[in-house]
Amino acid sequence: MNQKIWLSSPHMGGNEQNYIKEAFDTNWIAPLGPNVNGFENDLQNYLDRAAHVACLSSGTAAIHLALVQLGIGLNDEVLCQSMTFSASANPIIYQGAKPIFIDSELDTWNMCPMHLEEAIKDRITKGKIPKAIILVHLYGMPAKLDKLLAVAKKYNISVIEDAAEALGSKYKGRKCGTFGNFSILSFNGNKIITTSGGGAMVCRNLVDKEKTIFYATQARDNAPHYEHTTIGYNYRMSNISAGIGRGQMEVLDKHINLRRKINTVYLDLFKAVDGVTVMQELNENYYSNFWLSCILIEKEKAGFTSEELRLALEKENIESRPLWKPLHLQPIFKNCSYYGNGECESLFKKGLCLPSGSNLSSKDLVRISTTIKKFLGHFK
Ligand SMILES: *Cc1c(COP(=O)(O)O)cnc(C)c1O
């Protein structure tokens, strides 16, 4: 059997182990230490010098603490993109609040500004002003930020920017992860960089950063003994994980360029294929890290479905995956409200994510291309 080709797997730069060794040599084996501070500085310098970053145990933890700091509690309503990973919405439930799901638009596949406003107006007539908006940059593609932020501003609703998939992506030249009242990043195993598991909160000021760290380290008040006036969490990043992150930051831009190159390979491969489109940036305002390269397949024109292509790749031990299943269609969220007209549902039916890791070898790419070409040959 051929070796498995993954959708996206960890890709070390080489220096990660030196940072870990330093942590062992100095006995900083704790959820704090020089690597944590170093990784936070690296992220701040990369994103925006005005950003204030707190490293946490996961992206999910960061979304949870953003909701906590925005004061979201029992029965509050939070607007969330429907087409996303469940981790975008799960923390709403942790807080006893209610997710209200919003459809995608077809240019970026992210939250539709029109349906967002429609939802806000309707919730207000029903007597409730939504407390926050969680928007996502799926697969690294920046959302329509100008329009979404204008709606948020018009109704004075806070924005949590889920940039878990979009480190290094830019909208109008500004890095994703710097647009929200709180923005979050993920360093899970298959993300653009990994710390083997981890995340970060990007704050707009030092006070919010310090508050994030306070909540993430069990909310200890200032006293010699352990004194608590609020509920805390154990969400801080370890100094070992942060060491991996520091090494990964050294190769981040190099790895983004590799992923963008893989995207052009797929563009070439499918350019003459009727009914298949490779997801692209709408115009020069959008710069995607192309964390994953995705295609849409129109069955009527192409003669095959995304599932048939997925199975053909699987047969050759090549991983591909349907797009995120919209959350309003998930059994666990079936009682939640949804505003839209099913765009995300049709994207889910037609879409496929293709292997996109920065560590794919040229041999891997040939194997993928050959398998796809052979498959396409059946439909000529
Ligand atoms: C990965 C991911 C998360 C969660 O991050 P973790 O670090 O795995 O907790 C949240 N939102 C999106 C869109 C993601 O892709």
Image (spheres, grey):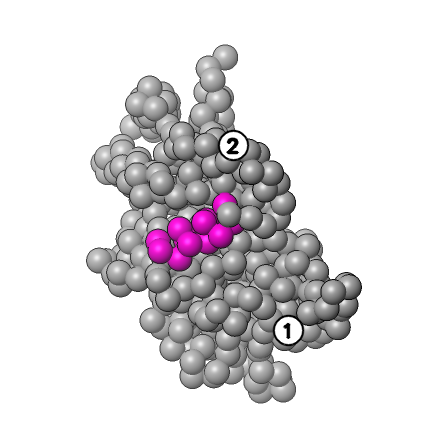
Q: At x 69% / y 65%, what residue is drawn?
A: 219
**Residue 127 visible:** yes
Secondary structure at numbered mark 2: helix
Q: At x 57% / y 58%, what residue is drawn?
A: 62
Camera-side residue: 107 or 162?
Answer: 162
Is 44 contained in the magenta span? Answer: yes
Residue 47 in the image: state x and y as whole percent. Answer: 36, 57
* Residue type indicated by callout 2: Lys
Q: Find the distance from the CA under tag 1 to the CA under tag 2.
A: 41 Å
Quarter the C terminus occupies: top left
Camera-side residue: 243 or 257?
Answer: 243
Q: At x 59% / y 45%, what residue is drawn?
A: 238
Task: Give neighbour class at mark 2: few <14, some 14-19, many 20+ (Cα, 10 Å).
Answer: few
Camera-side residue: 346 or 249?
Answer: 249
Verify CB contact (< 8 Å) between mark 1 and mark 2.
no
Camera-side residue: 357 or 66?
Answer: 66
Which image quadrant is residue 30 in?
top right
Q: At x 35% / y 62%, what residue is drawn?
A: 49
Q: Which residue is mark 1?
A: 72
User: Considering only vertical position in the picture, is 268 above or below 128?
Assistant: above
Q: Give the overall secondary structure of the magenta segment.
A: helix
Q: Is residue 275 left or right of residue 61?
A: left
* Residue type indicated by callout 1: Ile
Q: Which residue is mark 2?
A: 21
Task: Give neighbour class at mark 1: few <14, some 14-19, many 20+ (Cα, 10 Å).
Answer: many
**Residue 276 visible:** no
Residue 185 in the image: state x and y as whole percent. Answer: 48, 54
Is 276 contained in the magenta span? Answer: no
Tell me where the magenta segment starts and ends, as one range: 35-46
User: Considering only vertical position in the picture, is 312 above or below 324?
Assistant: above
